[in-house]
Image (cartoon, rainbow, N blue to C red):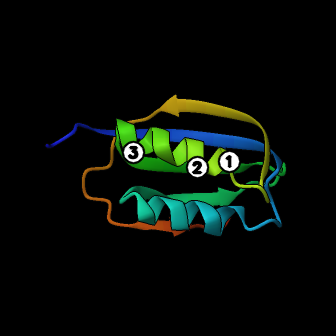
Amino acid sequence: MNETQARWRLRCFGRVQHVGFRYTAMYLANKLYLTGWVENREDGSVLLEAQGGTAQLRKFLIQLKSQPHLHIEKTEISSVPPQPYERGFRVRNRTGD
């Protein structure tokens, strides 16, 4: 089965910094074979882009929201163009590195 690739941009608000959010997101994304990145933002939110099949992206979001040490109060989700040559999922610093 070759599912069409989708890419979601998620901006998460709440107690999402200094609680292991970025590394939890990277672990879950790698487990689901998603590509993308995650970074802390200066306003205290976390921004991430995840790419893969729609079913895998839904699982990722559900698993991320169910982590007991993360307290996501609000999530903004938008669809962005897929990056066909991206490999892996990584933690980025605020400069987008």
**Which residue type carries mark 2?**
Gln
Query: Residue at the left extreme?
Result: 1
Judging by the rendered image, the residue that carries numbered circle 1 is 66
Judging by the rendered image, the residue that carries numbered circle 3 is 56
Give how far apart the Cα atoms at labels 1 and 3 are. 15 Å
**Which residue type carries mark 1?**
Ser
The residue shown at (68%, 48%) is 66
Give how far apart the Cα atoms at labels 1 and 2 are. 5 Å
Crowding around mark 1 (Cα neighbors within 10 Å: few <14, some 14 to 19, many 20+) is: few
The residue shown at (81%, 60%) is 17
Classify the position of the N terminus by image quarter.
top left
Q: What element carries label 3?
A: helix
Q: What element carries label 1?
A: loop
- Within the image, what quadrant is residue 18 found in? bottom right
Can the viewer see residue 95 in this picture?
no
Judging by the rendered image, the residue that carries numbered circle 2 is 63
Crowding around mark 3 (Cα neighbors within 10 Å: few <14, some 14 to 19, many 20+) is: many
Task: Give the image location of residue 51, x and y in percent.
Answer: 39, 48
Q: Residue 94 or 13: which is nearer the viewer?
A: 13
Task: Give the image location of residue 9, x and y in percent.
Answer: 53, 40
- In this picture, residue 1 sits left or right of residue 67: left
Classify the position of the C terminus by image quarter.
bottom right
- In this picture, residue 59 sits left or right of residue 84: right
**Which residue type carries mark 3?**
Gln
- Within the image, what quadrant is residue 39 found in? bottom right
